[in-house]
Amino acid sequence: AETTHTLSDSQLSMFSALFEPISLVERVNSDHMNIAMCISSCAPAFTAMYMEALGDAGVKYGLQRDCAYRLAAKMIEGVGALYMDSRTHPGIMKDAVCSPGGTTIRGVAELESRGFRGDVIAAVDAIENK
C-alpha cells in the first residue's frame, strides 16, 4: 500500500532536510505508526539491556566493565551499520559468523533454546497490546 501523508511537497522537503542529518526518516502507513514507534523508541531499552548483559558476562570472565561495554557498543553499532550499508538479511549476517561446530553457533543455539526470539517478540507484543 502506498504511504500517504497530509504534508505539502515543500513541508515534506523541509521536514526531511531538518531530520535526515540526525535521524532516519522512514515513511510508514498510519496503521503502522505504533509498531514503527515501538521499534525506534522502545527497543533501544531492549538493546541497552542486551548491552548490559554482555557487559555482565564480560565482567564474569574478567573484563573491566567499561571495556566490555565499549566492545558491546561497537559491535551493536557495527551490525547496524552493516545492515544499513548492505541491507543484508540479519539471518544471513548471523549465519556468516556461525562456523559449523563453532563457538558462535553454540551461543546462538543456547539463546534459541531459551526463547530469545520469542522473548523479544513478546516484549513488543506487551507494548502493542497495552
Image: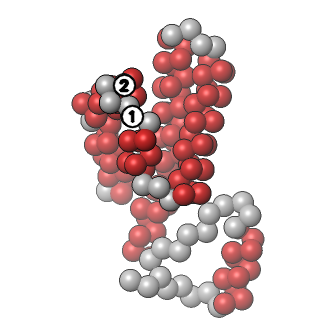
Residue 16 point in image, percent of width and height = 69, 75
Residue 41 point in image, percent of width and height = 53, 53
User: Can the viewer see residue 104?
Assistant: yes
User: Can the viewer see residue 123?
Assistant: no
Q: Spatial distance from mark 1 to mark 2, Cα to Cα?
A: 7 Å
| Element type at mark 1 | loop
Q: Residue furthest front?
A: 100
Q: Amino acid at mark 1?
A: Cys
Q: Nearer the viewer, residue 10 or 85?
A: 85
Query: Image point 66% across, 90% down: which residue?
Result: 9
Q: Residues within 10 Å of mark 1 (few under 14, many from 20)?
A: some
Residue 99 point in image, percent of width and height = 38, 31
Q: Nearer the viewer, residue 3 or 76?
A: 76
Q: Nearer the viewer, residue 44 or 2?
A: 2
Query: Image point 47% across, 55% down: which residue?
Result: 88
Query: Image point 66% across, 21% down: which residue?
Result: 66
**Number of the label disc, if any, that sits on residue 98:** 1
Q: Amino acid at mark 2?
A: Gly
**Number of the label disc, if any, that sits on residue 33:** none
Question: Considering only vertical position in the picture, is 79 above or below 25?
Answer: above
Query: Image point 53% across, 53% down: which residue?
Result: 83
User: Do callouts 1 and 2 mark residues in contact (Cβ within 8 Å)?
Assistant: yes
| Element type at mark 2 | loop
Which quadrant of the figure contains the C terminus? Answer: bottom left
Q: Residue furthest left?
A: 113
- The residue where tag 2 is placed is 102
Residue 124 point in image, percent of width and height = 37, 50
Question: Considering only vertical position in the picture, is 127 above or below 15?
Answer: above
Q: Nearer the viewer, residue 51 or 98?
A: 98
Which quadrant of the figure contains the N terminus? Answer: bottom left
Question: Considering only vertical position in the picture, is 97 above or below 8?
Answer: above
